[in-house]
């Protein structure tokens, strides 16, 4: 009964008839469902996580694991999880949750706005007694997702405390591919990267990225737009970004995929993560009251060449 009342209340306040509504999603978690002439999409309040974007006339662009958890304590495996305020393991606390704590937090709906061809959904969260246990700092986060022919995401961080704030962040996007083996990531040739499968050894990318084994790399000091070429789906996914100095590329391949309980054994073939981020030496520092916004825009285009 409570969920029904909460949903009704949120739809009265934010719903747009026939276009955007709050509904009960997997595991009873609430999500905003978008059905516009230009795209359909979904965004959960759990982690302010976009889990679907499908431009009209195109295939779903985001990968979502068939084995994902949809529970308070777990991150959703797929879509675009938000990593904040650290990336990967917390350097000084092995017990801390990987990729920070906001991807398992219940965010609040801030706004749903309709413009000519787009729908923008805004959600927010901030520091509280739980977050301060892991990270003694005060902050406010706003995540806005704009659904249309393109998908645009912006993550805005405000230092609401009295001390400088230093954090890492990533929009940990999972893109859906027809098959990973013939796929290629273009745009990072010549860029230095840290190879997390080889003790973070620093290397230089030679040409396109082709996935032939577990791949877990942090590309450094790059604001380059990348293109994901997917011959099986005969499409290209373009990802550009602003205020982001690192790009993470990840595919777990066979063994790592088997070790992940919330990923189907064979699903590594259908996904690749390309993550606009500010991690490692490119973590962001904000003075009290200061704000930082990282943006990414995703486009899907048929690949006439393949
Ligand atoms: O973004 C790549 C990465 O940091 C990998 O090291 C891998 O662990 C992946 O994220 C997934 O992390 P998760 O905590 O969601 O299992």
Image (cartoon, rainbow, N blue to C red):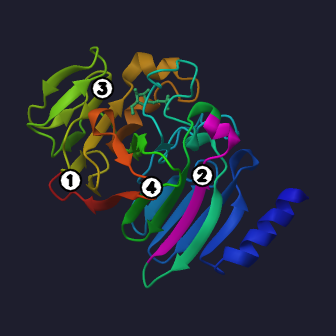
In the depicted structure, whether residue 119 falls above or below residue 54: below
Q: Position of residue 62 (x, y in %)?
A: 44, 50
| N-terminal-most mark, 2 or 1 | 2
Image position, residue 33 (x, y; %): 61, 64
Q: Position of residue 148 (x, y in %)?
A: 42, 71
Q: Nearer the viewer, residue 246 or 61?
A: 246
Mark number for residue 175? none
Q: Residue at x 91, y 58 (%)?
A: 1
Mark 2 vs mark 3: in front: 2
- Can residue 127 be found in the magenta stretch? yes
Say which element carries label 2.
strand
Earlier-in-chain disc, 2 versus 3: 2
| Apparent side of residue 263 relative to residue 169 in the rendered image (left or right) | right
Q: Which residues are magenta?
A: 118-132
Badge 2 is on which residue? 126
Secondary structure beneath label 1:
loop
**Reading the chain from its start, which is encountered first: label 3 or label 1?**
3
Q: Position of residue 251 (x, y in %)?
A: 35, 30
Measure the C-alpha gap from mark 2 to mark 3: 33 Å
Question: Which residue is denoted by mark 1 in the rendering?
Answer: 225
Q: Residue pushed farthest front?
A: 162
Residue at x 69%, y 48% (from the top left corner)? 26
Q: At 42% across and 80% down in the image, what residue appears?
A: 117
CA–CA distance between discs 4 and 2? 31 Å
Q: Is residue 182 above or below residue 290?
A: above
Instruction: Tell me if label 2 and label 1 are in contact, CB under 8 Å.
Output: no
Disc ID at residue 215: 3
Please name whichever residue, 27 or 130, is drawn nearer the observer in this view of the structure. 130
Please tell me whether mark 3 sits on a helix, a strand or a loop.
strand
Mark drawn on residue 60: 4
Q: CA distance from mark 2 to mark 1?
A: 30 Å
Nearer to us of marks 4 and 2 is 2
């Amino acid at each position: 009964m409570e969920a029904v009342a909460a949903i009704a209340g949120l739809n009265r306040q934010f719903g747009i008839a026939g276009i955007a509504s709050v509904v009960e999603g997997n595991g009873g978690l609430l999500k905003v469902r978008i059905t516009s002439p230009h795209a359909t999409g979904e965004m959960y309040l759990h982690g302010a996580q976009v889990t679907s974007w499908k431009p009209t006339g195109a295939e779903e662009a985001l990968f979502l694991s068939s084995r994902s958890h949809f529970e308070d304590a777990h991150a959703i495996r797929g879509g675009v999880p938000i990593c904040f305020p650290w990336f990967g393991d917390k350097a000084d606390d092995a017990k801390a949750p990987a990729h920070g704590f906001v991807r398992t937090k219940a965010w609040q709906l801030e706004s749903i706005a309709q413009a000519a061809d787009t729908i923008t959904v805004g959600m927010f969260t901030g520091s509280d007694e739980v977050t301060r246990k892991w990270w003694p700092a005060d902050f406010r986060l706003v995540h806005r997702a704009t659904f249309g022919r393109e998908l645009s995401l912006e993550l805005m961080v405000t230092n609401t405390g009295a001390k400088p704030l230093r954090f890492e962040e990533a929009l940990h996007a999972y893109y859906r591919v027809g098959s990973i083996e013939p796929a290629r990531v273009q745009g990072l040739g010549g860029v230095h990267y840290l190879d997390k499968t080889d003790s973070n050894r620093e290397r230089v990318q030679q040409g396109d990225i082709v996935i032939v084994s577990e791949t877990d790399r942090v590309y450094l000091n790059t604001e380059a737009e990348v293109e994901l070429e997917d011959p099986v789906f005969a499409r290209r996914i373009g990802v550009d970004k602003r205020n982001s100095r690192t790009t993470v590329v990840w595919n777990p391949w066979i063994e790592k995929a088997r070790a992940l309980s919330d990923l189907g054994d064979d699903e590594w073939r259908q996904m690749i993560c390309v993550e606009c981020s500010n991690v490692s030496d490119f973590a962001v520092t904000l003075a009290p009251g200061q704000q930082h916004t990282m943006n990414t825009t995703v486009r899907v285009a048929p690949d006439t060449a393949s």
